[in-house]
Image: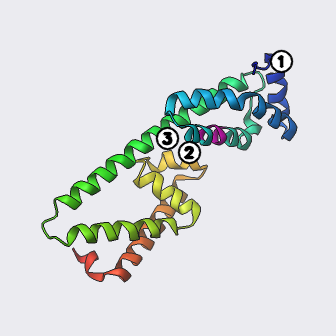
Amino acid sequence: MAMPAPEALAAWAQQIKHADRPAFSALFSALYPKLVWYTRTLVRDESTARDIVQEAFIRLWDRRAALDPNRSIQALLYVTVRNLTRNHQRDTQTRSALLERMDTTRTTSSRPDDGLNTEQLGQHLRRWIDALPTRRREAFELSRYCGLTHREIARVMGLSPQTVEKHITQALRHLREQLGALDPDLLQR
């Protein structure tokens, strides 16, 4: 598929800025295959590439009012995809490191039943985190699993740093309560 002419891209950008859905659809149809191809070269996985490109288009639509029709919408999408890919790769590395640490902790336990308890605790924590309200869970995960600061999380989520801190504090309180209900002795160790 040939790339659209710069004039068409500029026209679509102007129309998308004013919430024109057919223009957004045309842009999506024109650029999606190339963006997926590019992303797949970075992540080496078709499904992940498609998810990242879809997220880039969602972000474009969410931020359409700030579009500058004089700047390349195509370049904007490629930069967004590249940044989302970097985030994905960083998150994947973080998760791998956390899992590796958990495995190390499990195998170096001094008591035979500690490994099982650690695994069970991990399962409970994952379930409790998944049960958090969406925004609270997102703030908590960006903080604890991705290592972002409250200010960075605020930028990512479009919130104030104080709101981010509130979400994380409430998430931690909820997890402590759940942990205390599961095994009150765990909080004393």
Nearer to us in this view, 66 or 81: 81
Span colored in magenta: 52-56
Bin the neighbour count of mark 1 within 10 Å (Cα to Cα): few under 14, some 14-19, many 20 and up. Answer: few
Q: Amino acid at mark 1?
A: Glu
Within the magenta stretch, is there residue 169? no
Residue 155, numbered label: 2
Q: Report the residue at 45% width, 73% height from top.
A: 174
Q: CA distance from mark 3 to mark 1?
A: 32 Å
Is the C terminus in the top left, top right, bottom left or bottom right quadrant? bottom left
Q: Earlier in the sequence, mark 3 or mark 1?
A: 1
Bin the neighbour count of mark 2 within 10 Å (Cα to Cα): few under 14, some 14-19, many 20 and up. Answer: few
Q: Number of labelled discs?
A: 3
Residue 7, numbered label: 1
Could you tell me residue 110's position as x and y percent? 12, 66
- Residue 87 as seen in the image, left or right of residue 21: left
Foreground mark, 2 or 3?
3
Residue 131, numbered label: none
Q: CA distance from mark 2 to mark 1?
A: 32 Å
Q: Pointer 3: what residue?
A: 88
